[in-house]
Amino acid sequence: MAAIRWSPQALRALSPRETVAVAERIRTFLIENVCGTGGHLGPNLGAVELTLALHRVFDSPRDALIFDTGHQAYVHKIITGRAHGFDRLRQRGGLSGYPSRSESVHDWVENSHASTSLAYADGLGKAFAARGEGDRWVVPVIGDGALTGGLAWEALNNLGTAGRRRIAVVLNDNGRSYAPTTGALADHLSALRRPLAQADAPVSAYVDGPPEARNLFTCLGFTYLGPVDGHDLDAVEAALRQAREIGGPVLVHTVTVKGKGYVPAETDDADCLHAVGVVDPATGTARDTAAPTWTDVFAGELAELGAGREDVVAVCAAMLRPTGLGPFADRFPGRVFDVGIAEQQAMCSAAGLSMGGLHPVVALYATFANRAFDQLLMDVALHRLPVTLVLDRAGITGPDGPSHHGMWDHTLLSLVPGLRLAAPRDATTLRTLLGEALADQDGPTALRFPKGAVGADVPAVGRMGQVDLLSAPGRDVLLVGLGAMAAPCLAARERLAARGVEATVAAPRWVLPLPPELVQLAARHTLVVTVEDCARTGGVGSALAQACTDAAVAAPVHSLGLPRTFLTHGSRAELLAATGLDAGGIATAVHLAWNARHRRR
């Protein structure tokens, strides 16, 4: 199949029977390829027939197909001519795991943060109308729990008054995000799905009518079509064509099965096959036993701490197990609150939990914490509430690419008055710092750690306040490694020693506020170099440089960090090396700075 150059035009020329055969070929192709490279398997297996129908009814790219939480767009990539790239899916220089404007004109947006498609559609629909292109359709496809996000509700409020603009919202309702979708909306969708139990139930189309014919979407001004079996190609096509005849705004409610056609994924209650690494396609299980990850360490320690602290509760935004809250939830199910894909709600709700006498732990991916910044600042920090924010996937995450790298968290957190940020460098310090964070009742605390295996412990040989000393003192350079950067800094120290440069390696445990001991250490060295896997703006390096200037410390401070750009996808090791944050890159940068310093003198 990879040798075939698919196109929407070729798909539209097929008969219904031929299209059903294509769906099965695509499903087989996805299982074989995604199990071999890793990627989002379950969501795409569930969207095969729906995506084929979309391309048969609408004219992409003239009609804008917008995939919310873009990990459900693999079938769209195949149909738009990119099947040949799946052998390097999510690998550096290969096919992105999300829609990508640089890959195809068929990809309108590439931000894979959920709940955005309806707002994009609102703006695009208005733009098409303003440009006199009112015959163009905008078709946002929203699913995998994204409708629980606040932005989606704001957009629905606007789209419902869109008049005759050609907006067709497609709800890909599989009842799940990473886990079963929760909340009142989930209950409402479950009630709307019931007619599918009647084999001869027709597709309904209504805006007004008796109370029993009304629902959330009709109350907001949409014509509602559905529910439709999302795996019945004829039924989905018929509903989409009916939507075209009605005009907008219209919502087509399709019901799909996540992982459809692949037994391990269909029966995956824990959603382990939502996103996979390299797995055995016959069983859906990992081929190799993975080493303990940072997430695993956090998960185990939080559950242990929770056993001795009844006030500790946990909050997540639809990703309970991916963020490590599974063991805590298994032991204390009444103390875990999943708010759906709604990071703002998670943070503000945590403020309320704290006001009520509890100590909430809000577990998010670092990139998604961006969405809750206002609530952290004005609802948690302003009230000096003891809320602990745990940021998984901080720094370089790897194959998910620019929208998922946790690059901005430190910069944003540095703006929050009274917040303390910890940067564990290994499993032991993660456990210790999590305990210290939960013991802090004076205001918000946060921990950040990367994705992947946690590696061996990096023991300290001494301590100054909140700064661990990881090496014997060197007379030349103070090398400050933030969190997981401590280990490569130690390796760089050995390379520098071979070049005649002596370095002291230090690792601040709590990096916000800046430990004053770092300024004292800087005063003992000729050059200071900070290394952090986040943006340099607002990081430890910039804070230390300012503090040294204020204290009249002569040693210059050089900051190594991630560049101010959107980094592509690739392995964590590849991207750290490409940005100069591996041992070799650090040693080279320090040596160059050292030589430049001596030339000036």
Image: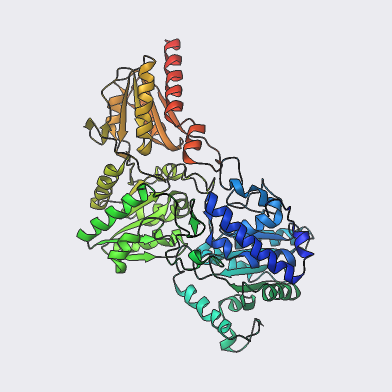
Residue 444 seen in this snapshot = no
Quarter of the image where the C terminus is located: top left
Residue 210 seen in this snapshot = yes
State the count of labels. 0
Quarter where residue 19 is shown = bottom right
Quarter of the image where the N terminus is located: bottom right
Q: Return the residue nearer the eye: 509 or 276.
A: 276
Q: Is residue 378 left or right of residue 137?
A: left
- At which x and y percent is residue 311? 24, 62
Quarter where residue 30 is shown = bottom right
Q: Return the residue nearer the eye: 487 or 550.
A: 487
Q: How is the image coloured?
A: rainbow
Q: Is residue 404 left or right of residue 105?
A: left
Quarter where residue 349 is shown = bottom left
Taking the view exactly as shown, the residue that stands out farthest to the left is: 308
570 is higher (above) or lower (below) than 199: above
Q: Is residue 101 left or right of residue 368?
A: right
Taking the view exactly as shown, the residue that stands out farthest to the bottom is: 210
408 is higher (above) or lower (below) than 364: above
- At which x and y percent is residue 67? 61, 59
- At which x and y percent is residue 143? 56, 65
User: Which residue sits at x=35%, y=59%?
Assistant: 325
- At which x and y percent is residue 424? 32, 42
